[in-house]
Amino acid sequence: MSRPPARPSERRGRGLAAEAIAARHLEGEGFAIVARNHVCRRGEVDIVAEKDGHTVFVEVRSRTSASLVHPLETLTFHKRRKVVAAALDWAAKNRRLDGRPLRFDVMIVLDRGGEGDEIEWIRGAFDGDAGF
């Protein structure tokens, strides 16, 4: 028997929890979290992190182990374009368009129930043209 779809407030709560897990993971890898949930008119980026002169924009996707669709499949071209637009907005406002490398990563947080969370980190998952 399948679970009924989550209510928007439940989805948002799970999304925020997944973003917190992803941010802690990045910090554990030596990244500084410089922004969370940057929203502009054209889109949103979940996490902005920096390490060794690189600025990394991270899109966090979460799913339960019972999900039929892999989280990466939910990251459509349209969504990637919105992430890139928000990232460029953040970079321009924070003077990071000075030639330093910008990277677009995806972190997938898979909730395995009582078994804990599994993190899949795809570095350089897509480019500034919003392609894979």
Image (cartoon, grey):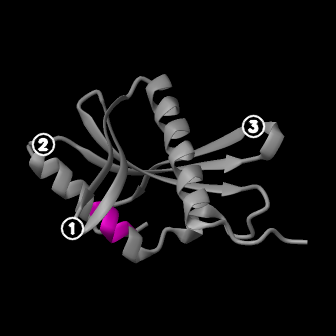
Residue 124 versus residue 119 in the image, above or below: below
Which residue is at a point 43% across and 66% down the rendered structure image? 132
Q: Residues within 10 Å of mark 3 (few under 14, many from 20)?
A: few
What amino acid is at disc 1? Arg
Among numbered discs 3 and 2, the one appearing first in the sequence: 2
Look at label 2 and name its amino acid: Asn
Is residue 46 one of those drawn in magenta? no
Q: Which residue is mark 1?
A: 41
- Which mark sits nearer the N-terminus, 3 or 1? 1
Q: Identify the secondary structure beneath mark 2.
A: loop
Majority SS type along the magenta span: helix
Local crowd size for mark 1, using a 10 Å CA cut-off: few (<14), some (14–19), many (≥20): few
Kindly identify the amino acid type of the residue bearing the numbered disc 3. Gly
Q: Is residue 109 left or right of residue 3?
A: left
Q: Which mark is residue 94?
A: 2
Residue for point 75% across, 37% down = 116
Left or right relative to 109: residue 47: left
Residue 111, given in percent of the width and then of the height, sits at 71, 48
Question: What residue is shown with label 3?
Answer: 116
Quadrant of the rendered structure where residue 56 is?
top left
Q: Quadrant of residue 53?
A: top left
Residue 68 appears in the rendering: yes
**x 56%, y 45%: residue:** 18
Q: Is residue 29 above or below residue 75?
A: above
The residue at 46%/74% (across/down) is: 76
